[in-house]
Image (spheres, rainbow, N blue to C red):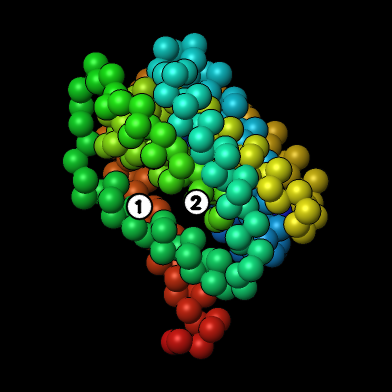
């Protein structure tokens, strides 16, 4: 019991650090952690992850606001359309078997991981964006994935804000946290009638994660974002491969 509590606290802390430092990665860590370590069903983990990631993102956003690395206009437009899409797409996960849901999750992680490594990131810190139409379209796409797969969307939002919307990397990290919180709230509302969540586990993850988000936001001043992004991309790819192999084995393909 004590051992599991320590594990839950450590996992929650790491998730918070990831969100505060990179503006994403919380759901990539949270859903597999709740399924494989805590022992929850994928559907329950999807709902719980939205609460955990949403709360941690709010803390990270507060810290980035104080550092001036947050674009409120982009966050509200991108996040607003994303919330609507996340709410409407939330019910789709209920029609899929757990193994299929995890396979889709892993495939998406793999694609984004390679994208983060192979796609060069612009370094212009004065970038102001590429227009509201692109922002709206990007928000709709990420919001749909948020509701369907139970991901807050940070590992999609940050690349979208940089490559599509045109924000500088540091600003994209801070802005993504507001959007994640908005999308997570909408996705959670769409899952209210789904499987019940374990409030004790959620509370532990949230409290530990809030501390981690505070630490992660401060670390962005010390570590270059490009180095962080590439390292995190490698981690995403490794975790995606594990999930793919594990779930393909469950359905007897290997």
Q: Residue at x 44, y 75 (%)?
A: 245
Residue 252 lies, in percent from the top left, at: 51, 88
Question: Gap between marks 1 and 2, in whole Å?
Answer: 13 Å
Residue 145 badge: 2
Q: Residue at x 37, y 60 (%)?
A: 110
In the picture, measured across the screen, residue 26 lies left or right of residue 161, that is right
Q: Is residue 151 above or below residue 76?
A: below
Q: Is residue 134 above or below residue 100?
A: above
Observer-nearest of 57 and 162: 162
Q: Residue at x 42, y 24 (%)?
A: 74
Residue 38 lies, in percent from the top left, at: 69, 58
Badge 2 marks a residue whose secondary structure is: helix
Residue 112 badge: 1
- The reply to whether residue 21 is visible in this rendering is no
- The reply to whether residue 104 is visible in this rendering is yes
Badge 1 marks a residue whose secondary structure is: helix
* Callout count: 2
Tell me the quarter of the image containing the C terminus: bottom left
């Amino acid at each position: 019991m004590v051992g599991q509590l320590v594990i839950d606290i450590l996992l929650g802390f790491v998730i918070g650090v990831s969100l505060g430092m990179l503006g994403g990665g919380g759901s990539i860590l949270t859903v597999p952690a709740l399924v494989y370590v805590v022992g929850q069903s994928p559907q329950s983990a999807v709902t719980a992850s939205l609460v955990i990631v949403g709360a941690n993102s709010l803390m990270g956003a507060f810290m980035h606001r104080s550092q001036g690395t947050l674009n409120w206009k982009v966050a509200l437009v991108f996040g607003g359309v994303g919330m609507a899409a996340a709410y409407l797409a939330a019910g789709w996960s209920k029609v899929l078997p757990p193994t299929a849901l995890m396979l889709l999750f892993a495939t998406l992680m793999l694609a984004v991981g390679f994208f983060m490594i192979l796609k060069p990131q612009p370094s212009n810190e004065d970038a102001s964006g590429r227009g509201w139409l692109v922002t709206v379209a990007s928000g709709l796409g990420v919001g749909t994935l948020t509701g369907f797969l139970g991901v807050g969307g940070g590992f999609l939002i940050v690349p979208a804000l940089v490559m599509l919307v045109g924000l500088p990397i540091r600003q994209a990290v801070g802005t993504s946290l507001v959007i994640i919180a908005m999308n997570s709230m909408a996705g959670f509302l769409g899952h209210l009638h789904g499987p019940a969540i374990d409030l004790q586990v959620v509370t532990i993850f949230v409290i530990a994660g809030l501390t981690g988000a505070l630490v992660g936001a401060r670390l962005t001043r010390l570590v270059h974002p490009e180095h962080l992004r590439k390292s995190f991309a490698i981690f995403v790819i490794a975790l995606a491969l594990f999930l793919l192999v594990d779930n393909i084995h469950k359905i007897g393909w290997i």
